[in-house]
Image (cartoon, coloured by chain):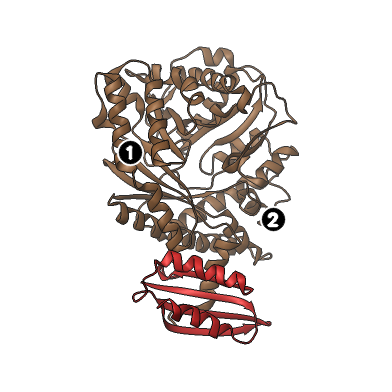
Chain colours: A brown, B red
Amino acid sequence: MIDLNTADILETIHMIDEEHLDIRTITMGISLLDCADSDIDRACDRVYEKIVRKAEHLVRTGEDIEREYGIPIINKRISVTPISMILAASGGDPVKYALALERAAKEVGANYLGGYSALVQKGFAAGDESLIRSIPEALSVTDHVCSSVNIGSTKTGINMDAVALMGQIIRECAEKTADRECVAASKLVVFCNAVEDNPFMAGAFHGAGEPDCVINVGVSGPGVVRHALKKIPDADITDVAKLVKNTAFKITRVGQLVAHEASRRLDVPFGIVDLSLAPTPAVGDSVAHVLEEMGLEQCGCAGTTACLALLNDAVKKGGVMASSHVGGLSGAFIPVSEDAGMIDAARNGCLTIEKLEAMTAVCSVGLDMIAVPGDTSAEVLSGIIADEAAIGMINSKTTAVRIIPAIGKQPGEELEYGGLFGSAPIMPVNTASPAKFISRGGRIPAPLQSLRN
Amino acid sequence: MRAVITVVGKDTVGIFAKVSTFCAERNVNIVGVSQTILEDMFCMMMQITMDESDLAFADFADAIKAYGNENGLAIHAMHEDIFNTMHRI
């Protein structure tokens, strides 16, 4: 027939039906800069009105594309200007903004809304500190709102006052929602080198340099990569890298198609496709299993970092060719609770936090969806944040910490979220105290960008 | 718009007739067909156009999938663009 190859057609259908190929998210970025007002109630009304106006057709359009193209689009999300910038103009109780965002997300049917955020890599401006201190309350009284705080960057160094504060904030988040699996902490990300066009939650926000409204798309597809690798069990690593690259190209092309179509139908500019291989807890959709398919007994064993480095790089190489604009986080995600293989490896102790930290040096994004014992101190959490931020700062990459102190629980127990968030085995933490270091405050100076040997 | 229908199932008499009749009854035009038998499995690709049909494509895709389920066939109807973008540079 037809100028299409039968094998290609069947491959595509197989990817979607059997291998969990999907579009993880269409995320609409909306600038709220024009909603700022000295009266907080008026500002909240404007925020609500603008989000509802811009995103009115987002969910419906996503569903239409899903049905017409036969490709599942799992989430329709919204990211907004960091609320600390709007709060700077109005002052007042920041939680009012969180409630306005929640109402807007519910009204338009978005799965998540990110941007209850502050960028404090060099210090706290007006609005920043009060927004950060309100995060536990904001995330415990809302379901859809996600929060992020950028505490460091390669250009500025690391704001250690913010690092110290975020350890406390994460604990407060967990404590406030201890009766709900400490869920507030799972909606908060602490970044170094945060990106302004990330479509993935919980760290999405709409950067100040972005257009008024934009469509960003995040793809998924670890299952597809794993299935492809299964077909070449004895190939050498050069061929493994090539196959990952080819597969990533195909996955990303679908993302590009959906992004283009969503942008056209919504009459909103296309921003980027995020190349991240985002896993889900579903069996067969795991990044850990991709690594194991390369020849590891279990994710976390010796060789894991090398396999992940290969995977991450090959995904980028294939993906860049497939999309006209690539951005966001773009890499392989390793969220423990959201990945069936990571969950298994964490349960039996093969995967440790220390190994995960090493893995984050070569992939996107960081220590993600990790549950730690409920008695982990704020200072230890801050120390973990500082370590992760240092990796990002020195290597000019984004790193993040989304860590959940499981209040009242110890290693051997788990937090159960269900859905995309999965279940998080509680991982042991080195409890020796960095309290003195954390309490010093100040800033870690920006690193040298030359003499890199 | 152009779309691709794939039909996979155990080979029996009349699969082609069933699917093409289903399309004809809905004014869906078949513009290309290829088929093979792979290990007793009937495997057919049809390229169609929806220009003369009153049905929305998504509704047609749902209907033909359900029709396939009733008849022991895995039938997918998908927009042609998804195959073109994935397999062509």
Q: Amino acid at mark 1?
A: Val
Query: Between tags 2 and 1, which lies in front?
Result: 1
- A22 vs A43: above or below: below
Residue A66 image-quadrant placement: bottom left
Expressed as whole percent of the image width and height from the top left, the position of residue A326 reads 38, 51
Residue A33 image-quadrant placement: top left
Report how far apart the C-alphas of labels 2 and 1 lie in the structure: 48 Å
Residue toward you, A126 or B9: B9
Expressed as whole percent of the image width and height from the top left, the position of residue A160 reads 46, 19
Q: Residues within 10 Å of mark 1 (few under 14, many from 20)?
A: many
Badge 2: chain ID? A
Residue to which mark 2 is pinned: A295
The residue lying furthest to the front in this view is B25
| Residue at 30% in and 20% down | A40
The residue lying furthest to the bottom in this view is B13
State whether discs 2 and 1 lie on one chain.
Answer: yes
- B64 vs A416: above or below: below
Q: Secondary structure at mark 2?
A: loop
Can I make out residue B69 in this image?
Answer: yes
| Residue at 47% in and 41% down | A111
- B75 vs A413: above or below: below
Q: Amino acid at mark 2?
A: Gly
**From the viewer's perspective, is A30 left or right of A371?**
left
Residue toward you, A184 or A453: A184
Expressed as whole percent of the image width and height from the top left, the position of residue A57 reads 34, 48
Dot placed on the residue nearer the N-terminal end, 2 or 1: 1
Residue to which mark 1 is pinned: A52
**From the viewer's perspective, is A141 left or right of A281?**
left
Q: Secondary structure at mark 1?
A: helix
